[in-house]
Image (cartoon, coloured by chain):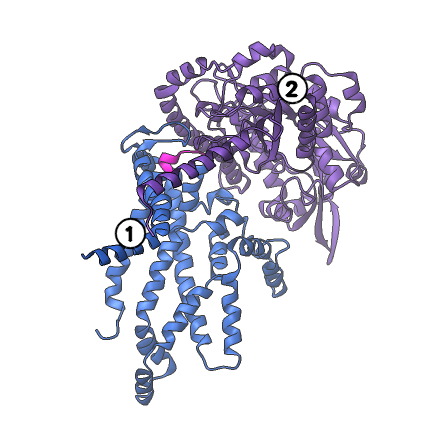
Chain colours: A blue, B purple
Amino acid sequence: MTSGERRRSLVGLAFVSPWLLGFLVFTAYPVCASLYYSFCDYDVLSRPVWVGLLNYQDMVSDSVFWLSVRNTLLFNLIALPLGLASALTLALLLNQPVKMRGTFRAIYYLPSLVPAVAGAMVWLWILNARLGLLNQVLVGIGFSNPPQWLVDPAWTKPSLALVSLWGCGNTVVIYLAALQGVPQSLIEASMIDGASPFRRLVHVTLPAISPVIYFNLLIGIIGGLQVFTSAFIMMGGAGPERSVLFYAIYIYQNAFEYRHMGYASAMAWVLCMLILVLTLLASQISKRFVHYQGE
Amino acid sequence: MFLSPKNWFLLACVMGLSCACSRDSSERSSNGRVVVNYWEKWSGFEADAMRAVVDDFNRSQDGIEVRFLSVAGVDTKLLLATSSGHPPDIAGLWSENIPDFSEKGALTPLDGGLATAGIKGEDYIPLFWELCRHRGFTWGLPTTPGCVALFYNKKLFRAAGLDPERPPRTFAEFESMSRRLTVVEIERAGKRVRISFEDLTPQERGGRKYSLVQVGHLPQDAGMFLSGWGAWFGAQFFDGERRILADDPGNVAAYGWLRHTAQTYGVENLRGFIEGFGVAQSAQTPFLGGSEAMVVQGPWMPNFISQFAPGIEWGAAACPAADGVGGGSPVTLAQCDVVVIPHGARHPKEAFKFICYLQRQDVAEKLARSQQKFTALRNVSVEFLKNHPNPSIKLFIELSRSPGARYVPRLSIWHEYDAELAVARERVLNMRMEPAEALKEAQERVQWKFDRVMRRWDAVGKERVAEWRGYDEW
């Protein structure tokens, strides 16, 4: 490396140094520290005491830990397919050459610009069993006993899944971009072959955008396993009978409410591993279904 | 473009100096007084009352300037500030925080200072003094204590044909009045009518096809004492050593009563009724909204009534306990707002001077009067009672001195214990579990958690106590 190149490298490094510094202080150090604390009994105030694998062993015998895993997986089983399918359906509709298409696109995207807390507060009232808009409508169309969305433990997870659809505008935009990229030649060829719109969708459009579906699935898994805000705001944390005590909420409770920072750190690492495993699993399964152009 | 080592050094010096200067500026006021930072949980009129006391203190001397800051979520923020080494000099907490915070080394033991200042336990109502102590040390001093009584709406009593000057005296009366005061809306002969629950036919009661319009009393609406219903059924929560007693027969009886309420009015009816209301201490609570006739609350309630529902004509009395509980003495649950000096506070001596100032009878009474509460001091001045804006203040003072007065267990994991009791309560109220079964589960979980805490205490306890004994700042 010549002195000029070295100088340019140093200038480059100097320019990225604020980010690097921020990354080291606010991400790299906490991540490493949390790994160490996960092997400690640590309450934030007193010095951490090394306890080896005890936090991980405690997790095995902690019934609420398993409940939080179950709640999170169940929620994702409802919310993830529902979210992906709804966003795709919306994107397909918004991709149709209709009047005021731009306006419709803006309308469906707008909710994702609303801050999560504000959205949650609105939904809190929409889903109110007695006074909420949704139940008023349901009663109006003949449901005599509509669900108590937020106070009946059986309905809390579906309610939050419903609320999660509110912010699917981002996913819709990604799908829309992908739909623009579906080769027109393939669509025309299938039309000449006499394929119905449904068959064109299944055999041309969906395979063509499968990498984007896969991307949204991965993002959905990663985000879904960390679901926190809506339950925290709308249910005050765990919800009735801990029915929406999600994994991230249990981590938060242990870390900041009960001050079992060591245990919370161990849980965070298990979550990290869980996400890694599920992502790898998804990528293995996806090999059969995802088609990249040029393959 | 690049700094030489010499320039780096200069830059570091400038940054260091600016840090040092900024720290200095917060330690001394412009007129040379030592600045004592005080974080308090109160907001609104309660914060205003303490702010006035702080102003009085600042005017009364010229060596210390207390700076009052109203902080939401003060307990969590205090812990984070303490762990980072920059706590305030004084913090206003709840007495339930003391076991947890002291065991974790977040507080400064005050005993040495108290001895020097001549402040003794005998100066206080015993129960409130006990609430300031843990593991043989004193960790804070009271600001305003509280205990609960039954507030009732006289207008609703009158409308139900009950004597508004005669609140319930026994638990059976409490229950029967509650049913009389409950109003439901039901369809009769094709028309929606509103009638008292007591006037429903047995078939209508059993069918539960009505909606609740007004309730006599909601066990779920007990504010911060929701987990303490067991106290009115003679429950013990902790054996004082190592055993958690969540499934104590008294607690099982209390939860049985909750279940009975849900059975009487219907799970969905109750859930629907409660969900229509808003957060505590707002105009949207059932009592302040005029839809609940009786509620268990503390001496602060008249303040909220005058703020949110000035039209309510209210009375207060001791909340009746189950038969035989309290040995004839009224039962109440008490707690106390306390001021503490966090571990690592920069000016503990100056902070302690202000805390001692708050213990003066005239100061404590001024603060209590402004907040419509009473003081934790044993002595009460005649003027205090005479000029107090809360007409029920004598009742609360008497309740706090009753042999039947109780407090929640002094455990560092009370917050978690409370959460487990809440889950058990929800399961019982939703009729998913029998009281004994739900409480057995809570018992196992809390015991498991407490064993973990004790495991740590066994490892560090001796060291911690020696550290506290060695504290000689005073």
Residue B259 on image: x %, y %: 57, 37
Type of the residue with mark 1: Leu
Identify the residue shown where x is 40% and y is 26%.
B453
Q: Residue at x 53, y 40 (%)?
A: B426
Query: Dot 2, crowdedness within 10 Å: few (<14), some or many (≥20)?
Result: some
Disc 1 packing (10 Å; few <14; some 14–19; many ≥20): few
Q: Secondary structure at mark 2?
A: helix
Quadrant of the image containing the N terminus of chain A: bottom left
Residue pictured at 43% horizontal, 41% vertical: A252
Look at mark 2 in the image and give the residue it sits on.
Answer: B357
Q: Residue B219 lies in what quarter of the image?
A: top right
- Image mark 2: chain: B
Magenta span: A258-264
Question: Which residue was labeled with disc 1?
Answer: A276
Residue B440, compared with residue A146, is above or below; it is above
Q: Amino acid at mark 2?
A: Tyr
Q: How many numbered marks have been drawn onto this rendered protein structure?
A: 2
Query: Which residue sits furthest bottom?
Result: A192
Give the left or right position of residue B466, taking residue B292 as reference.
Answer: left
Q: Chain of mark 1?
A: A
Residue B308, visible in the rendered structure: yes
Along the viewing direction, whichever of A289 and B173 lies nearer the viewer: A289
